[in-house]
Image (cartoon, rainbow, N blue to C red):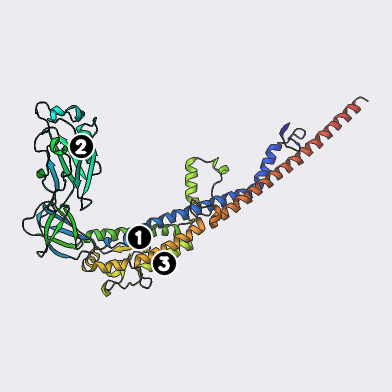
Amino acid sequence: MVTGINSNFMRIGGLASGLDTDGIIDDLMKAERIPLQKMEQDKIWTEWTRDAYREMNTKFSQFEQLFSSMKRASSYKVKSAISTQSDAITATASSSTSNGSYSIEVSQLATNAINVSSTGLSTDASNKIDPLAPLSEQLDKLGATSLPSSLKFTTYQNNPAGETHEIQIDATDSLGDVLAKISDGTGINAFYDVQTDKVVMETKSTGDFNPGGNEIDFSSDSGFFANIFNMTNAGEKGGTNAKFTYNGAIDLESKTNTTSINGLTLTFNDVTAGQARISVTNDVDKAVDSITQFVNKYNELIESVNEKVIEKRHRDYKPLTELQKKDMSESEIELWEEKAKSGMLKSDSMLSSGLTSMRQDWYQNVDTGNANLNHLSKIGITTSKSYADNGKLVIDEEKLREALQDDSDAVYKLFYNADENNQGLVNRLEDSVKQTMENINNRAGKTTWTAEQYTLGKKLKDMETRMDDFQERLAEVENRYWKQFTAMEKAIQKMNQQSTYLTQQFGGM
């Protein structure tokens, strides 16, 4: 029978010999493919190793992300500010604020300037204007004979010399349209109150920007405000600065009810009953939380790395090729690959070196200006005595709190100091982590890198080339087997034909 056709010859299997040529050649090719199977397994192992390195680099990167916050003074020198009159005044303290007690007496709050129509806009309270209909069609309701073509007013929030706003009034403009134009980019909120039939104009900013004068000045107006809105300069109220006394000695003003002085941010909600006391102390809880989070992340990192470098390698469990997986169930594949992937980074020198470097970084002395707080152990952070912890750090919270309370500046310098000759712990750790990540990237690359940019990528590319070449050789070997068997079949067929011919000749004698 004919089993296949090659471009150069016809494959004939078992036609004359009766042999299972397909089966025989399949068995022969299985033996020939054994080196290819090993190549495939090596390629899979290399891919797994690359991915395991990248997973470790992700762990290092997550730890690295905490460095920026650990370089900020606010992570260590967190301040708490407590007011004795919290209903009237609240405060927050920056890391630069000195601990102590401060007195604040608020005598006046900052207010917005506000002006309201002296009387209702409508002449008849029972027949008020429609704020959505054109004003030009409601002059009788307003008690006006004509509608000015524009209005003018001056504000001072953005320019001490005054900023005049001129707004054009169209015949189709409603009251709502005019108020929207007044409120557009002028620093003024203008609205109509239906219940009182009055217009309200209020500055968006608190404060006295025009001492001795109005914050919303109608002096330049041709009569719109007086005749249509029933509003004059005399009706303005507010526009005041906040006034307070600091430590009983300095009288100060602020255009807003939130102001900063000596690192304190003060918010005024009401005038005080005499002096309010603001007590500033170190907020040890937040600082402890920041340091604890950092140490815990480091412990997670070294736990992950240690698991990989001591993980047992099961050399009898080779990676499964796609052909091998065909004869296995999903659960069997999962269990097999769990064993096969174990120990990929066992005793890896890059990871081990990275761990060693970080451990050394933690235990360097740093000149903090306080000899009692120049080493990690002196603030209550030491290496776990348990062998099973593999170098994890443990925190004596009471000792850490005491160090932060006594000298938060020194604790900050212990962790962060950019001086190359006296680097802080975070600075040293950052250098070690970056070097380890760079080494891993050189070997395993990033997902965005091409194969030529890292060592394992080049190795995988070389493997693929060798596998492609081997596949071509296998095709040639298979063709050779078929040619040999086909030649044999043809020879047997020819012999059979000759035998039949001779039998026929002798049978006729």
Give the Cα distance between marks 3 and 1.
Answer: 17 Å
For residue 148, which quarter of the picture? Answer: top left
Residue 289 visible, this angle = yes
Amino acid type, residue under disc 1 in the picture? Phe
Between 258 and 39, the one nearer to me in the picture: 258
- Horizontal side, residue 174 vs residue 475: left or right: left
Is disc 3 in contact with disc 1, using a CB cutoff of under 8 Å?
Answer: no
Q: Which of marks 2 and 1 is nearer the N terminus?
A: 1
Q: What residue type is labelled 3?
A: Ser
Relative height, residue 432 to residue 339 (above, below): below
Are the residues flagged by discs 2 and 1 in contact, CB closer than 8 Å? Answer: no
How far apart, in angstroms, are the residues tagged by discs 2 and 3?
69 Å
Q: Name the residue under label 3.
A: 357
In primary-sequence order, the first of circles 2 and 3 is 2
Query: Which quadrant of the structure image shows residue 80?
Result: bottom left
Q: How crowded is mark 3: few (under 14 residues within 10 Å), some or many (20 or more)?
A: some
Q: What residue type is labelled 2?
A: Leu
Cβ atoms at labels 2 and 3 below 8 Å apart: no
Identify whether 5 is placed above or below 209.
above
Q: Mark 2 points at which residue?
A: 179
Residue with the mark numbered 1 = 67
Label disc, if present, on residue 196 of the rendered structure: none
Give the image location of residue 366, x and y in percent.
33, 72
Compared with 109, 355 (above or below) is below
